[in-house]
Amino acid sequence: MTEPDDGLSAVMGERRGLLNLGYRLLGSLAEAEDVVQETYARWYAMSRDEQAAIECPGAWLTKVAGRLCLNVLSSARVRRETYVGEWIPEPLPDPDEWTTGRAVDPADRVTLDESVTMAFLVVLESMTPAERVAFILHDVFRYPFADVAEIVGRTPAACRQLASSARRRVRAADAPARRRSRDAEVVRKVKRAWETKDIDALIGLLDPDATVVADGGGLVSTVLHPVTGADRIVRALAHLEDRFRDQTFLERTVNGQPGLIAQRDGVTVSVYAFDIADDRVTRIWAIRNPEKLRQWTVEARH
């Protein structure tokens, strides 16, 4: 019987951390998985002697993944200029809420904490690629600026400034502390008000300056520009009522926070993430791009 390769186990044990890093940097699980795959491809392209000469494989893998993410972010800015409508990060479900019994490898799970809420990821989208990488590596993953500098290709002092600039953007967003139980109740009331067509209740649950942002990616119909104002949002929803008629709304966790999904014939067609302050909805992100819903449509394939 062959003895397990401890070195191989240690290297493969980095997969989950790399996936978590990639998702936070890119806002796309699909792109994060591609980065992780390419990172390991580069590791196994080396000879055994070259691998053995690397003192800390985990640090090497992180450095490669970070640089790959930086490249993807830089090219993504160009791609998103031609993206149809608004671009929203790919929403993630809570694996424990999947009802199919589908086994999820722990190495393939993204840790759902405050650094992956939709509100936080959207703030990250406003940063330059270098700011985002420096901030996530240092403030979220606690890498020293000397290591961050090797990945970003700038001096530690420059990386410190990048992270500081990113931190100011996060503070400017002024995201309130989340209280999940109260947020869940607000989302539940939104669902009930919509299902019962209680327009007054729905308007009362929305902040007067609430905004809805939708992402269809040009693959499905949706509003192409953000809709701001509680009254305008409700009017827009009423205008789209025929689209919702044959859909079932379910409460689900979206990126670690209370959210909703809409299903048609058991297939998820939309995912809704919410930002809530003072028991009112301040922002709704509606993700309808089917390419971003593959983690949600697993039920239809079983």
Image (tube, rainbow, N blue to C red):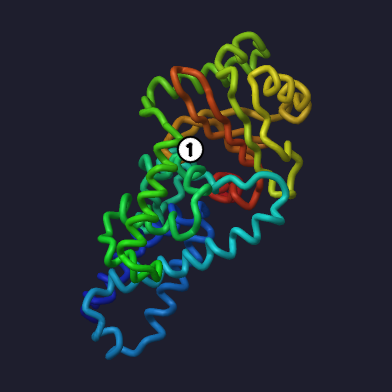
Left or right: residue 259 versus residue 110 is right
* Residue drawn where x is 63% and y is 28% of the image: 248
The picture quadrant where one finds residue 194 is top right
Looking at the image, which is closer to me, 142 or 202? 142
* Residue drawn where x is 43% and y is 52% of the image: 24
Question: Looking at the image, is 94 positioned above or below residue 278?
Answer: below
Residue 105 in sight from this viewpoint = no
Q: Which residue is mark 1?
A: 119
Residue type pointed to by label 1: Ala
Check disc 1: other Cα within 10 Å, few if <14, some if 14-19, many if 20+.
Answer: many
Looking at the image, which is closer to me, 143 or 204? 143
Q: Quadrant of the N terminus?
A: bottom left
* Residue drawn where x is 36% and y is 62% of the image: 158
Tell me residue 152's x, y (percent): 40, 67
Left or right: residue 137 versus residue 234 is left
Tell me residue 291's x, y (percent): 63, 52
Tell me residue 236's x, y (percent): 73, 25
Residue 230 in sight from this viewpoint = yes
Question: Looking at the image, is 42 positioned above or below residue 76?
Answer: below
Q: Secondary structure at mark 1?
A: helix
The picture quadrant where one finds residue 151 is bottom left
Looking at the image, which is closer to me, 9 or 74? 74
Left or right: residue 13 versus residue 207 is left
